[in-house]
Amino acid sequence: MTLTRSDREELLQRIENTVQEKFYDPEFNGKNWKEIVANHRQLIVNADSDPAFEAAVSTMLDELGSSGLGILGPHTAVTPRSSINASFRAVFTPSEGLRWAFQDILPGGIAARAEIKPADLLIAVAGREPEPPHSPAFEMDRETEITVSRAGQRRSVRIDLRTRKPKYKSNPYSEPRSVAASVLEKSIANLKVSLFPGYIGIDFANEVSAAFDRTFQKADGLLIDLRGNPGGGIGGLRVMSYLTPGKTPIGFSLDRPMAEHGYDKEKLPRFGHIPRFKFELLPLALKFAGKRSIALITEGLGNRRFHGRVVILVNEHSTGAAEMLAQFAQENHLAKIVGNQTAGRLVSRSGVKLGHEYTLVLPVAAYTSWNGVRIEGKGITPDISMDWSYEAALEGHDPQLQAALAALNAA
């Protein structure tokens, strides 16, 4: 498919109208949306190729300064966290120069299955060398050859990005193992959460409950690792519910009508239980049909031995629902947060089909904690700051994990 000028004009008009009508902030982050469109119109409609059109639209959308806003099309490359289930840090080495180093390798994901390790360097993707600051990106639904290097030793790896039909039209992705549970030294439960799959997350919630009720039954300390977690649905409610015995308000989404007309958070419909079986979804769908602004409340799962001795690991690649969980724990003094400042990307997104195989992804609601704090664009500051180290990772060490364990042992 090749877009004509008329096609590009039509798509731009639909993008302009959709953002004007549905963007969650009626003030457009203090920007003049119509002026932004006017400034970029000629570059977009006169683009000499479809990839150039997509790039010009993305540049225009970036000016609004909001996460969760972008265009998906036939040539859109997907970020590493969603495509190969890994994140990167720019590093300089004497042997390879300035390169992207693999940082978070999510369990069961594409990179993990290719036996890539933290501190491996990404040299090439399909013959192209993505050097910082140009972020690496990967096209879905195909096999791709990449070249990696470790301590100067290069090797080629073939990764398969062919997936089933995407679960979310607003976010095609490869899915890692969402939950990995183990017990560390001194009866410390270790919960690695790589993703919050599904809108409601029934399967995820059941898996989390199985970990707490079986593997973690006698644990008297809890470590939750959210590093590299790109977010997802509201299955994180189950994890938050294990942090506190009662039913505690978490936060709510603030959509365009609420922002324009005001609201009373106490009167919002409340979601405070993830069902165990999928046949229970129909009553939920009827109850919350058409409602974007919903208050989240923990499920009231009772006391646990590890309460008062919880640490959550985060980094700059922890976004969305992962930030919601960390913010709830920090605001309510339920856990110490260890690691790096999070990304500050916490909005509810929706995908709108534009035609010509394009989808506009846009934020339709901003998340606000029950205390009224919005972290979109700000992120969460850890209680204990500890950076990732390429040199340590190359030796197989994890300073952030060690800092988290030290905090738990001191509690």
Image (cartoon, rainbow, N blue to C red):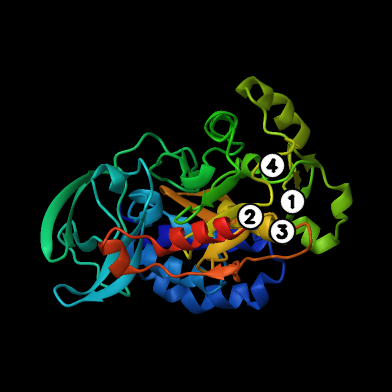
Tell me the amino acid under the disc marked 1: Ile
- Indicate the secondary structure of the residue bearing disc 1: strand
Q: Which residue is mark 1?
A: 250
Q: Secondary structure at mark 3?
A: loop
Q: Against 311, is 128 above or below?
A: below
Mark 2 residue element = helix
Residue 312 appears in view: yes
Is 224 on the left-hand or right-hand side of 45? right
Q: Which residue is mark 4?
A: 241
Q: CA distance from mark 1 to mark 4?
A: 10 Å
Of 221 and 20, nearer the camera is 221
Real-space Cα distance between discs 1 and 3? 13 Å
Type of the residue with mark 2: Met
Q: Residues within 10 Å of mark 3 (few under 14, many from 20)?
A: few
Q: Residue at x 85, y 61 (%)?
A: 262
Could you tell me which residue is drawn at 24 percent across and 60 percent down? 120
Q: Residue 377's spot in the image, x, y percent? A: 59, 70
Q: Spatial distance from mark 2 to mark 4, Cα to Cα?
A: 13 Å
**Residue on which the image places disc 2:** 324
Q: Are marks 1 and 3 in contact (CB under 8 Å)?
A: no
Considering the image in quadrants, where does the C terminus appear? bottom right
Q: Quick one: which residue is furthest to the top in this view? A: 279
Query: Would you say the residues marked 2 and 4 are in contact, meaning their CB atoms lie under 8 Å apart?
Result: no
Judging by the rendered image, the residue that carries numbered circle 3 is 333
Is the residue marked by circle 4 packed among few (<14), some (14-19), or many (20+) residues within 10 Å? Answer: many
Q: Are marks 1 and 4 in contact (CB under 8 Å)?
A: no
Element carrying mark 4? helix
Q: Is residue 56 left or right of residue 330?
A: left
N-term mark: 1 or 4: 4
Confirm or deny contact between disc 2 and disc 1 (CB under 8 A): yes
Taking 102 as reference, is 239 above or below it? above
**Closer to viewer: mark 1 or mark 3:** 3
